[in-house]
Amino acid sequence: MEQEEKKKLNIIAIADNSDYGTSAIRYGGILAAIFKASLTVISNFSFSKNNIQNKDICNEQIEIANQLIQNNIEVFLLSNPFTPDNIYSYGDETNSIMFVIGVQRKGKDSLFNLKKARRFIKPSRLPVMTVGLKLPDSNVFRHVMLPLDINRQHKEKALWAGYFSRFYHAKVHVLYATYKDSLLKQKVKDNIDFTKKLYQNLEIDYELHDFGREIDDIDRFSIFYAPEINASLTVVMMTAFYTIIDYIFGPKENALIANDEGLPVLCINEREDLYVLCT
């Protein structure tokens, strides 16, 4: 029996006519090159089918798409209307591995603000990369951060950080804090031991960063630490179940998505059917 041809991967960038939409396309193109994938640009997205208007991709973004095509990246420009349910289904049908969205923390220049970004990410089985206006440079994604804490749900997070090493020879920087409490210290150690074993088996290039002290939010800390190691991505898990504190003050990812430093964030949901690459 002949071996079935492996289906090509796809990246989906959701773009409005703002600079945030342009940034999403630029990052989407780089991700397509890294993962040897096609890029689909969706320019007509709304959370409600009643609010969808005809929106074509702007000339600047068409020019970027043409540049990607000239560099042998297959690009699809879709102007037909999409709602979240439509786009999640489209992602499944097209072997898509990731969504890319440009997020403006406050204001109305972008399709996605912080609240709408969380609303889009929460139901997605695909990872969602959020980007700001900081444009990618020639070294983007060469250094990726994997912040580890006491939570157990780190397998998928570690896998996704590792893909950038397997596909792009990036270095994964594993960040963790030291706790005085013996139980918390053991939980962190278990996560580190798991990640080390996984990365050694997969031949992932990684480096451990022990900060030797307690850190309240290692994910948020990674945003500030990025310049120290020239990192251009942090990988985080979304809050699975909101507490009363989350409802009042917002979940911890509020401090990460659309951060002031403009650092891209790969957001992963805790769910059994989360998309993982078969490599």
Image (cartoon, rainbow, N blue to C red):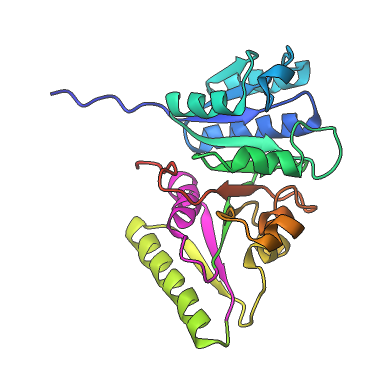
Question: Is-magenta flag for residue 109?
Answer: no
Give the vertical position of 18 relative to 270 (above or below): above
- Res. 99 image quadrant: top right
Give the vertical position of 156 relative to 18 (above or below): below
Q: Residue at x 67, y 47 (%)?
A: 264
- Res. 55 image quadrant: top right
Q: Residue at x 74, y 14 (%)?
A: 53
Question: Is-magenta flag for residue 167?
Answer: yes
- The spot of residue 174 in percent (x, y) is 53, 65
* Residue extending farthest left: 1
Q: Residue at x 45, y 69 (%)?
A: 191
* Residue extending farthest right: 107
- The spot of residue 166 in percent (x, y) is 43, 48
Q: Quadrant of the C terminus?
A: top left
Q: Would residue 154 appear left or right of 227 to someone viewing this image?
A: left
Q: Would residue 93 appear left or right of 107 to someone viewing this image?
A: left
Read off the magenta span: 149-178
